[in-house]
Amino acid sequence: NMDVAPVVNMDVAPVAGAERFWDFWVSRVASQPNITIVHNFMSKEDCAFLRKLADKMGLLPANKFKVGNGEGGSAVTLNTILDSIYDIVRTSKGEFTALDQLEPEELKAVLTYLRRTEQLTGLAMGNYEPPFLQYYQPNNVFRAHYDMYQVDMARPFPYKDNQR
């Protein structure tokens, strides 16, 4: 039975120092940058479901998501330079969840996670992209990457009016 309710006992903090935030237990790891752990967002079964869904979807190597327009040629542009950097920086696999291609039970589960996200962030589901499933193997690493921002070198990064 999947619902929006948290997945752990809310009467007892899961770790020392965790604080209750609405229906969630959270721990602040760092304030700059803001790194917060939400302890009861998903159960082990939820994570296993998403791994199975990712396998079914077929994830793409992250460096296949190119910044450039794919026209090729010998001209060196900012996009070709960024694509070369992303080939080094991005080591994972991932893909957006195509909600319209899910089986009814899969969709029900994914919508449950979206409702939890909505509850935690206060942002309505219509304000964000479909879930992006990301997979890191043991030797893969997450490094900062800025392709989702339109960077203005004259302003501090990140600035509030980027497109996401």
Image: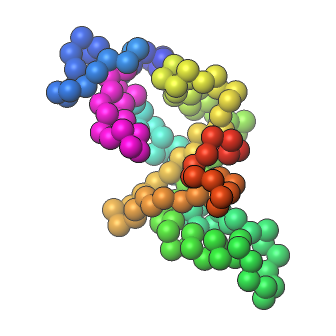
Indicate the quadrant where residue 94 lies: bottom right
Q: Is residue 4 above or below residue 66?
A: above
Is residue 38 visible in the rendered image? The answer is: yes
Residue pictured at 40% horizontal, 28% vertical:
41
98 displayed left or right of 92: right
Residue at 22% over, 20% down:
13
Tell which residue pokes out farthest to the front in this image: 154
Highlighted magenta segment, given as a residue range: 24-41
Q: Position of residue 144 (x, y in %)?
A: 48, 58
Placement of 153 over or under 103, stated as above or below: below
Horizontal side of 65 relative to 18 (left or right) equals right
Q: Nearer the viewer, residue 104 or 5?
A: 5
In front: 161, or 24?
161
Name the magenta segment's main secondary structure: strand
Q: Is residue 43 visible?
A: no
Residue 139: image quadrant is: bottom left
Residue 86 x %, y %: 57, 69
Task: Where is residue 88? Give x, y as percent.
Answer: 51, 74
**Does the magenta run of residues contain 83?**
no
- Location of the C terminus by quadrant is top right
